[in-house]
Amino acid sequence: MNQRAMIAATAATLMSLALVSAPAAAQEKEKCFGIAKAGQNDCASVAGTHSCAGQSKVDMDKMEWKYVAKGTCKDMKGLSLEEAKKMKS
């Protein structure tokens, strides 16, 4: 096998491994509310004040969230979606 074919085969293998492992990595994350710094939220606010990432205005707003490794939110003093919704009411 020539060097160019070997590099192409290696690159194809690495890319397919990355695609296969991506869904598993997404499943190992959870939304954690109340830990995002201003401008560093991952998506829409529970309160409905915006619908995009990076639009939070206040550090540690209980209505804003970030993805964190599953099982680590409480260690960071964060809230679950249910807890954040209760605070909204």
Image (cartoon, grey):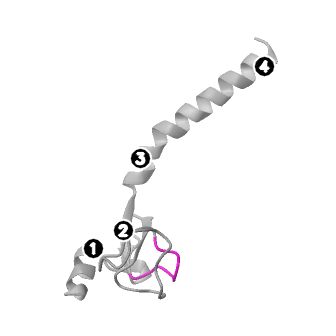
Residue indicated by mark 1:
81
Span of residues in magenta: 34-41
Residue underneath mark 2: 31
| Sequence-first disc among 1 and 2 | 2
Distance CA(mark 1)–CA(mark 2)? 7 Å
Secondary-structure class at tag 4: helix
Q: Which residue is mark 4?
A: 4
Q: Nearer the viewer, mark 2 or mark 3?
A: 2
Q: Amino acid at mark 3?
A: Ala
82 relative to 36 in the view: left or right: left
In the displayed structure, 61 sits above or below 8; it is below
Dot 2 or dot 3: first in sequence order is 3
- For the stretch drawn in magenta, what is the main secondary structure? loop
Mark 1, residues whose alpha carbon is within 10 Å: few (<14), some, or many (≥20)? some
Could you say where residue 17 lies in the image, as x and y percent from the top left? Answer: 54, 35
| Residue 36 shown in magenta | yes
Disc on the earlier residue, 4 or 1:
4
